Image: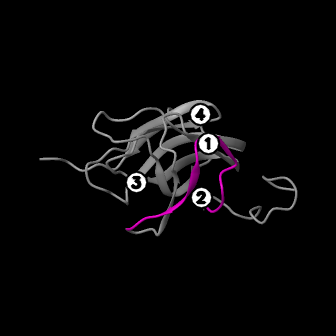
């Protein structure tokens, strides 16, 4: 027995841990139609809500050893993208406005300082849109948890997204 209980191939992995959570369908779809779509750029496909409605959401479950984690996901930015909220076990940990007038297929968003251990649920939910956006869509081509440290005293999660300066 180890971190994960009965026989798991991940029992012997030490820190840091990292894995892509979009290798399969989400554990649950709360609202909307979600599917894999073809995209250009560094990745050939993305997971997206083709229904493009406010409130569309899906969840993925992660079972991890106790520790501090960083959630990273490639959140594509484009003209019809919405604002996505990320929740860990029902508590919002970050919100990202993904609108951009021209497409950006490589935009890493992250939430650091997540204290986790055991099974957890991550929910991605559309919660509105930028006034300039043409829709409520969310596309992600990669999503991973990275263990950044052992359990620590409570930290405030920090949300960041790479952005470029506009002159």
- Label 3 secondary element: loop
- Which residues are the magenta region? 23-40
- Label 4 secondary element: loop
Which residue shows up at 65% across the image and 34% down it? 89
Q: CA distance from mark 2 to mark 1?
A: 12 Å
Looking at the image, tell me whether mark 4 or mark 3 is earlier in sequence order.
3
Read off the residue under disc 2: 22
Q: CA distance from mark 4 to mark 3?
A: 33 Å
Q: Residues within 10 Å of mark 4 (few under 14, many from 20)?
A: few
In this rendering, position of residue 139 left or right of residue 4: left
Question: In this orientation, does residue 70 appear?
Answer: yes
> Up-down: is 71 above or below 20?
above
Residue 80 lies, in percent from the top left, at 36, 46
In this rendering, position of residue 138 left or right of residue 8: left
Which residue shows up at 48% across the image and 34% down it? 54
Read off the residue under disc 3: 76
Q: Residues within 10 Å of mark 1 (few under 14, many from 20)?
A: many
Q: CA distance from mark 1 to mark 3?
A: 18 Å
- Give the quadrant of the N terminus: bottom right
Q: Residues within 10 Å of mark 3 (few under 14, many from 20)?
A: many
Residue 126 lies, in percent from the top left, at 49, 37
Residue 3 lies, in percent from the top left, at 78, 52
Read off the residue under disc 1: 122
Read off the residue under disc 4: 153
Residues at discs 1 and 3 in contact (Cβ within 8 Å): no
Looking at the image, tell me whether mark 3 or mark 2 is earlier in sequence order.
2
Is residue 72 part of the magenta span, yes or no? Answer: no
């Amino acid at each position: 027995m180890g971190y994960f209980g009965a026989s798991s191939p991940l029992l012997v992995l030490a820190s840091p841990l990292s894995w892509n959570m979009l290798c399969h369908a989400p554990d649950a779809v709360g609202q909307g139609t979600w599917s894999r779509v073809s995209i250009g750029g560094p990745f050939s496909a993305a997971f997206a809500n083709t229904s493009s409605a406010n409130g569309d959401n899906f969840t993925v479950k992660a079972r991890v050893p106790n520790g501090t984690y960083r959630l990273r996901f490639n959140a594509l930015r484009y003209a019809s993208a919405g604002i996505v909220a990320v929740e860990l076990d029902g508590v919002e940990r970050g919100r990202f406005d993904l609108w951009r007038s021209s497409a950006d297929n490589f935009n890493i968003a992250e939430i650091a300082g997540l204290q986790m251990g055991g099974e957890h649920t991550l929910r991605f939910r559309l919660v509105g849109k930028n006034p300039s956006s043409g829709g409520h869509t969310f596309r992600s081509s990669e999503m991973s948890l990275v263990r950044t440290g052992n359990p620590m005293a409570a930290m405030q999660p920090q949300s960041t997204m790479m952005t470029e300066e506009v002159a």
